[in-house]
Amino acid sequence: MNVNLEYYKIFYYVATELSITGAAKKLNISQPAVSQAIKQLEQGLGIELFTRGAKGVSLNHAGTLLYSYVRDGYETILSGERQLAKMMNLETGEVKIGASDMTLQFYLLPYLEEFHQLYPDIKVTVTNAPTPQTIDHLQQGRIDFGVVTKPLNVDSYFDVLRVRSVQDVFVAGDKFRYLADKTLDYKELENLPLICLEGNTSTRTYVDEYLVKRGVRVSPEFELATSDMIIQFAMRNLGIGCVVKDFANSQLKDGELFELRFKEDIPGRDMCLIVDKRSTMSVAATKLKELLESNTRRTDFNGIE
């Protein structure tokens, strides 16, 4: 049986309106076109579906049976179209992002606030994890995109866009104030109590690699999960904290901590928006990504307009 599916659509409207004229108006086609389509459907199925009368049409037994199935199917299609339109108009949908504490706090948060104001019905899920885990989540399709920090270990399947720069520093509290006026060599860190992030983070990897290239190998007194905790430990004089400077800006400004000076600074590195080109993002995720990219084009990597 090979019946044009468009005939079922016309059948649905005739059966719903119980009128050839009414169906023609709903479909914005001529009455003869509706009548012809119903005739072709009945011929294709080999059975009449309507009883014709002076006041219009009514479903017969066969028509009632067919309508019960066509109605469910067609109305499901209409419902799907409505939901698709909502998704296209950003009235519904979901964005899944991967981000670390740092990228969320010092880059993403204001843009998420702006996005929520523009599209309040879009659900945003942030998976909080260090850069290596965020890349794994992206490869597994668990997130739409990630905001991570270098160093990155990715292949050509990934698009990487710089969004701002960050600076790694060492900070300390009053107990170590005797170091404030000195210009240190990184080798001296081997004899100082250090507070660092755990080893599975891009920050720890970057700093360790920089120090090793200079013949410096450190063994931290404390290895912590978050930079915020490193700041708290450093303020309590438990050691010298290694953090991205953004985390310590408030305490450095207030004098609760000071930044250690070295003969050369650790080179700055980049915060990046990363996307797996093999994956298809949702409409909502694409819109948020466009918002981030647009702001990146208007802003230099220090966040200055």
Image (cartoon, rainbow, N blue to C red):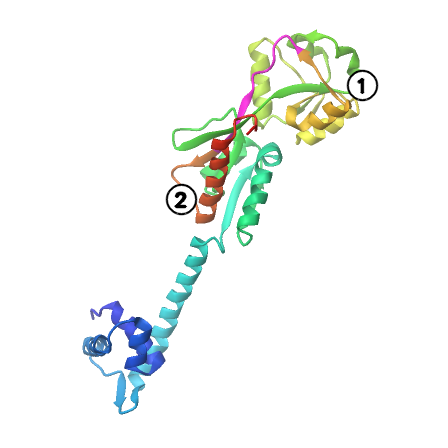
Label 1: element kind = helix
Residue at horizontal 65 percent and vertical 24 percent from the top? 245
Residue type pointed to by label 2: Thr
Rendered location of residue 59, percent (x, y): 31, 85
Tell me: residue 74, above or below residue 243.
below
- Is residue 69 something one can see in this rendering? yes
Q: Residue 60 is drawn in which quadrant?
A: bottom left
Q: Which mark is residue 27?
A: none
Q: Is residue 73 left or right of residue 46?
A: right
| Residue 52 image position (x, y, % from top left) | 25, 88
The structure residue drawn at horizontal position 75% and vertical position 29%, both measured from the top left corner, is: 232
Q: Is residue 31 magenta?
A: no
Residue span colored magenta? 262-273
Give percent across and percent down for residue 35. Answer: 22, 79
Apparent side of residue 54 relative to residue 176 in the rendered image (left or right): left
Q: Quick one: quadrant of the N terminus? A: bottom left
Residue for point 64% across, 27% down: 246
- Taking 114 as reference, is 261 above or below it? above
89 versus 19 height, above or below: above
Other-residue count near label 1 (Cα within 10 Å), few / some / many at <14 / 14–19 / ≥20: some
Q: Can you identify the residue that label 1 sits on?
A: 174
Residue 62: image x %, image y %?
A: 29, 83
The quadrant of the image that shows the C terminus is: top right
Left or right relative to 115: residue 276: left
Q: Earlier in the sequence, mark 2 or mark 1?
A: 1
Amino acid residing under circle 1? Asp
Q: Specify whether 123 is left or right of 88.
A: right
**Residue 128 appearing in the image:** no
Check contact, mark 2 vs mark 1: CB within 8 A. no
Q: Nearer the viewer, residue 59 or 68?
A: 59
**How far apart in space, not on screen, are marks 2 and 1 (Cα)?**
52 Å
Residue 280 - label = 2
